[in-house]
Amino acid sequence: MKALSQPVIPPLIPVLLAMMTGIFAGSVSSLPGPAWVVLISAVSVFLCFPGLAGRKKPIFWLCLGFAIWSGYHSFMIHSPRLPDGHISHFHNRRDIVLTGQVVSFARQYPYKIRVTVECRTIELPRGTDPSKTLAATGRVYLNLYGTSDNHIRFNDHIRFPGPIRPIRNFGNPGAFDYRTFLIRQGIFGAVYLNVDKIETIKDAPPSVWTRGIQGLENIRNRFYGFVMTRLDHRDGAHVLAALVTGIKHRMPPELRDQFARAGTSHLLAISGLHMGILSLIFFFVFYRILWLFPGWMVTARARKIGGLLTLVPLGLYLVFSGFSPSTQRAFVMIALFMTAFVIEKQTHPFNTLAGAGIVILLIDPAALFSISFQLSFTAVFFIIAGMKVVEKYPAFQVPAIPRFMASISGITLLAGLGTFPLIAGYFNLVSLVQIPANLILVPMIGFICLPAGLVSLMIQPLVPDLAAWLLTGAAQLVEWCTWYVTWLTQIPFAWSYVPVWSWLDIFMTYLVLGAVLCVLNFRKTAPVMAAVIIAVMGVYAFRVGVPDTPPGHLTITVLDVGQGNAALIETIENRTILVDGGGFSGSSQFDVGRYVVAPFLWHQGITALDAVILTHPDADHMNGLVFILENFQVGTLIKNKDTSSHESFVRIMAACAQKKIPVFTPGCQKNRMGWENTRLTFFQCNASNPGWDGNDHSVVFKLTWNNFSMFFPGDIQAARERFLVETMTDQLSSDILLAPHHGSNSSSTRWFLDLVDPETVIISCGFNNPYRFPHPDVIHRYEQKNIRVLRTDQHGAVTITSNGTGYQMVPFYSDVKPQ
């Protein structure tokens, strides 16, 4: 009898693609009402899968139904109809009190704790509404500061005051859409409070389920503290804690960067690799126990029961590790694979992968836009596709250890090929050493350190010293791996940050990779696929081969960096100068350079800067430059004479020393920097006075190109402004002024404005900043002189283009008019 061959296209693949089509249609539709989304989804299926309507009508109608359902739910996620009691209607109100239920584990930071709360009611002050208490919907991030004996745990019912702050994005080209990211999770605001203002509501005894989850949360936190205390917060402790508990947000950024540059950052997250290793370990343990019953071995029940039992500890570990989305997806995939194994149903691996995707998207359609979802499924897809290619070639008898190493190398290569276009697109990072790195780290960390950490977790309550001994050995092995990774990433060209890849670049890269797999898998397609590869490579060669030409205009972008300053100058000669890098002061750990300035530069296609200007060493101008100096090629650092003991300043100067970046301090003689047409004139002669405030020492300069000019005064105040007025009377006039000191009342004096005489002022300040910049008096002075005002807190980034005579300004939020 002739064996039935597997279908070329597994039947669940079109269903998954139809769901993805519907979800995407629902997310981008700007038409009113979900009915339009249903229509768009249906038309998309007819266009994308016309061949299914004939021979495979059941699959076609299944695709159509899933696409419509997914499109409708995606539309409701991205354009929801919010009821009257939704929390988004009460943003910034200080007179409200909310109650809600904690729906996440507490996420602990050095100075705060953050939980997600599902709001239940909103209490309004008396006299504002006939009903004092409204039913509320929507989730908020609750950020708690200070210490208290009242620990917030999962599923607690709590009461807390407002205000609810709206989620805001940084308004820059190429910026991450954090607001949409949170809306997809149902989060519409954030509350910042001292922990003593939280009241726990004891309305009913917790259920067994709640007590169980809270117990796992307590065990998780205690074990994390045990690891960090016994291992003295060393690098190995951070990695082990992340491996076992899933808590990795406290890991030093430098350590995460080393793993990312080596292409091994997936080892730090509990995802498919970890869950797969754990499933093998648990299955082996259960199978060996059940092997003791001969009757079950003969009937093969031992394997089936072992497979089912494996899902129990995996489910507990899923909850223990914080129930992260990546872990949920890994659990669903393993559960489907294990189910097929238990029922002895031979299925195409692509079909199982598609089934896992369908289940995940049914639960959460917005998961399609998750980076981890995309990386996980592309990695597994390419691994399966690569294995299918290998099966077509004769196998060689190879000893076990070389065969294992070859398998690790092959899987790493396939996963790396499948994910590198997405990694380059999302993270602007390409690693060329991921194969040698994963070849050592996957078996060491995955098969030795991870099991050692899990054994320590289980025995720690009984024999803590033995657990600490195991952890110490595992930490030492992790640190050897870290040293190996550091050595690899120091090899020239081992890794590189790259400009932003467009979706067209990503699509074309996957087209080439898919064509290569088709050629290897289906010999008959070789001519067509070869033509595809040649065509795509020809387009790439043409794009790369076209030389960069001068832009023909000057561009200045004043970035939205919150309460701080940062601006990029792109001259007509193709020179790039970054003026300050923004930064948050105090206890904030948010790296403006890494998450705001660098993504904008990559979006502009910039990986090297001709000059970086640090106007003065204050946190809101300096902190963001640390990442830039350490990770970009920089020609010159320009700064004033001031120094600082601040960690950021120390790291900036260390980066200059290590990378041999010259440091230029303008003075009376060396006060110009210029190219063919563009000139920077610095006003730093005698710009240091013991009686001045540190802000008055800022680097002050004027950018000039033909008849266009813009004045950059840093954070100078009245004293330095008066000095400039008295000594540089005829040199200050400019078309545009970057407001001194973010619009503080101590700056922008009348005599200074009279001499600069700008047509436009751009104020770089944070939304609702604690200093209340810009000051109303300063705005009034601008209005009196008929100066047009743009503000980064309202208009986002402001892009100025000039042809040397006039200029145009385009705010990021174009619907907000200048003042």
Image: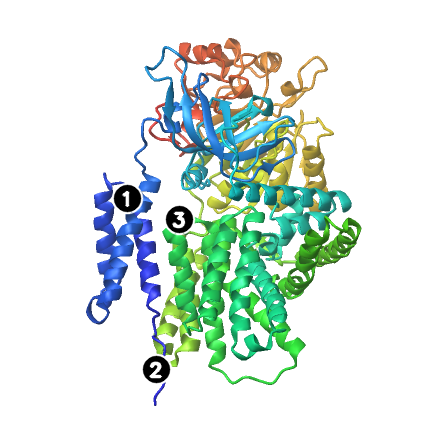
Residue at the spot of label 1? 29
Distance from Cα at disc 2 to Cα at disc 1: 43 Å
Q: Is residue 168 visible?
A: no
Residue where numbered disc 3 is placed? 364
User: Which one is closest to the eye, mark 2 or mark 1?
Assistant: 2
Disc with the residue nearer the chain's start (3 vs 1): 1
Mark 3 Cα within 10 Å, few/some/many (few <14, many 20+)? Answer: some
Callout in the foreground (3, 1): 3
Type of amino acid under label 2: Leu
| Three-letter residue code for mark 1 | Ser
Q: Earlier in the sequence, mark 3 or mark 2?
A: 2
**Is 618 in front, or is 584?**
584
Asked whether 766 or 755 is in front, the reply is: 766
The C terminus: image quadrant: top left
Residue plotted at (40% across, 70% down): 515
**What is the secondary structure assignment of the residue under circle 3?**
loop
